[in-house]
Image (cartoon, grey):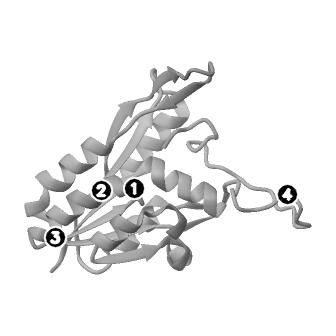
Amino acid sequence: MERIALFIDGANVYAAAKRLGWNFDHRKILEHFSAGGALYNAFYYTAVPTPIDDKQKRFTDALTYMGYTVRTRPLREATDEGGETHRRASLDIEIVTDLLSTSDRFDTAVLLTGDGDFERPVEVLRARGKRVVVACIAEMTSYELRNAADEYVDFKDIREHVERPGYRLPSESRGNGGSEHRPFYTSAALQETDDR
C-alpha cells in the first residue's frame, strides 16, 4: 500500500483560502489526500504569536487532535524604512528538513503550497524515487514548482471534498461593486492578523 505524507505550509494555505473566499476543513484535507493509501504523517507548519494567544492555541491543539504533527515558529516583528511594522516567520527550513529527513518513510509527498522555493527539494525527492503532489491555486503556484512535481492539484477542483461549510473568508477577488452581500465567517483561529 502506498505510504503518503502530507506537508502543509499554513501561511500559504491561509493566503489561498483568503483569495478563494472559503475556508478549509483540515480533517477533510487529511481524509482526501490520504484516501489512496496509508498516511505516514501529516505535518502542519504555522507561525504563532509570543506569547501564544488562546485562539491560536485552540487551533494548534485541534490540529494535533486530528492527527497532525504541528511545527511552529514565533512570529517576529520588523519595522521597514517607512515605519510600518510587519509580523513574519518563515518555516521553509522546517518543511524542507521534514521532507528530506522522513523520505524513507513515504512513497508520496503531498505538499500544500505554491511557493517556488520548494522546487529544488521536490526535485531531490523525485530523484530518490518519490512521487510528489503539489496542491494550491494556480495564481499562487510558481511555474517552477508546478513543473517539478509529478502532479498538480488546484484547490478549486477539490472544493467539495475539502471545504469547511459555513465558514467563509473575505475573498481578495470578490469586488465591492457586486449586488450579492453574503456574510462571511472566520474560524476562531483564523483572524485577519494571523500570518499563516
Please tell me which residue lies in front, 196 or 53: 196
Q: Earlier in the sequence, mark 2 or mark 4?
A: 2
In the picture of the structure, the residue carrying the numbered disc 2 is 118
Residue at 42% in and 42% down: 60
Q: Earlier in the sequence, mark 4 or mark 1?
A: 1
Is residue 66 in view?
A: no
Disc 2 on helix, strand or loop? helix
Residue at 64% in and 40% down: 192
In the picture of the structure, the residue carrying the numbered disc 1 is 115
Amino acid identity at mark 1: Asp
Relative to 49, say whether 178 is above or below. below
Instruction: Indicate left or right for 154 with 44 as reference.
Output: right
Please tell me which residue lies in front, 190 or 98: 98
Instruction: Indicate left or right for 73 with 83 as reference.
Output: left
In the picture of the structure, the residue carrying the numbered disc 4 is 176
Outermost right residue = 179
Q: Is the C-beta separation of discs 2 and 1 under 8 Å?
A: yes
Say few, some or many: other residues with alpha carbon within 10 Å of mark 4 (under 14 / 14 to 19 / 20 or more).
few
Amino acid identity at mark 4: Asn
Q: Is the C-beta separation of discs 3 and 4 under 8 Å?
A: no
Q: Earlier in the sequence, mark 3 or mark 4?
A: 3
**Image spot of residue 154 (x, y percent):** 48, 74
Say few, some or many: other residues with alpha carbon within 10 Å of mark 1 (under 14 / 14 to 19 / 20 or more).
some
Say few, some or many: other residues with alpha carbon within 10 Å of mark 3 (under 14 / 14 to 19 / 20 or more).
some
| Disc marking residue 126 | 3
